[in-house]
Image (cartoon, helix red, strand yellow):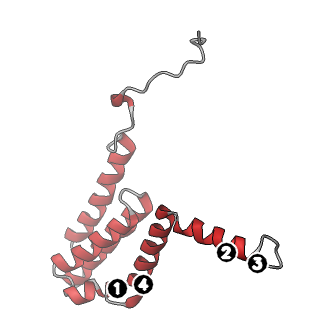
């Protein structure tokens, strides 16, 4: 029988860390409160510029505190720029109109498919059998 001193207690579902733990809760409040204050405080700036700064500060704080995934934070920022009429749609999402992000997405998807299906290992094994395992032959 196992010694009870070394027994690992089963984790109770309520004992797991919730996404709204106290530290995360305060981060979320901070990430939302600072840009909201910047949005409404009376600065001597044009309204669109002040709103753009508030959205940018939201994105920077969300990235820095990692309250949201980085990609999701970027998409939310682009959406806020467009939805709140700071810039037009083609300006807010212009980074996605270029070929580079789509090329990278395709490369990541092909790499994931090759790794999940085992094709990458089969190709590496085939090359190793044909060429050999010595450094000079590879």
Instruction: Look at discs 4 and 2 and give the one toward the viewer.
Output: 2
Categorize mark 3 by other alpha carbons within 10 Å: few (<14), some (14-19), many (20+). Answer: few
State the separation of the CA atoms marked 1 and 3. 39 Å
Comes first in the chain, label 1 or label 3:
1
Residue named by callout 4 = 103
**Disc number at residue 127?**
2
Q: Quadrant of the C terminus?
A: bottom right
Q: Is residue 43 visible?
A: no
Which secondary structure, mark 3? loop
Q: Is residue 118 left or right of residue 46?
A: right
Comes first in the chain, label 1 or label 4:
1
Tell me residue 124's x, y (percent): 63, 70
Tag 1 near tag 3, CB within 8 Å: no
**Disc number at residue 138?**
3
Residue named by callout 1 = 95
Instruction: Look at discs 1 and 3 and give the one toward the viewer.
Output: 3
């Amino acid at each position: 029988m196992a010694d009870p001193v070394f027994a690992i207690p089963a984790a109770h579902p309520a004992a797991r860390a919730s996404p709204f733990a106290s530290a995360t809760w305060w981060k979320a409040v901070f990430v939302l409160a600072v840009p909201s204050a910047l949005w409404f405080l009376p600065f001597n700036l044009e309204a669109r510029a002040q709103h753009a700064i508030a959205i940018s500060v939201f994105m920077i704080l969300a990235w820095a505190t990692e309250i949201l995934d980085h990609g999701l934070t970027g998409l939310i920022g682009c959406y806020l720029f467009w939805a709140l009429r700071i810039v037009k749609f083609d300006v807010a999402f212009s980074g996605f109109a270029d070929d580079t992000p789509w090329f990278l997405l395709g490369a990541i998807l092909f790499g994931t498919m090759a790794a999940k299906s085992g094709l990458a290992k089969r190709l590496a094994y085939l090359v190793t059998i044909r060429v050999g395992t010595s450094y000079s032959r590879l």
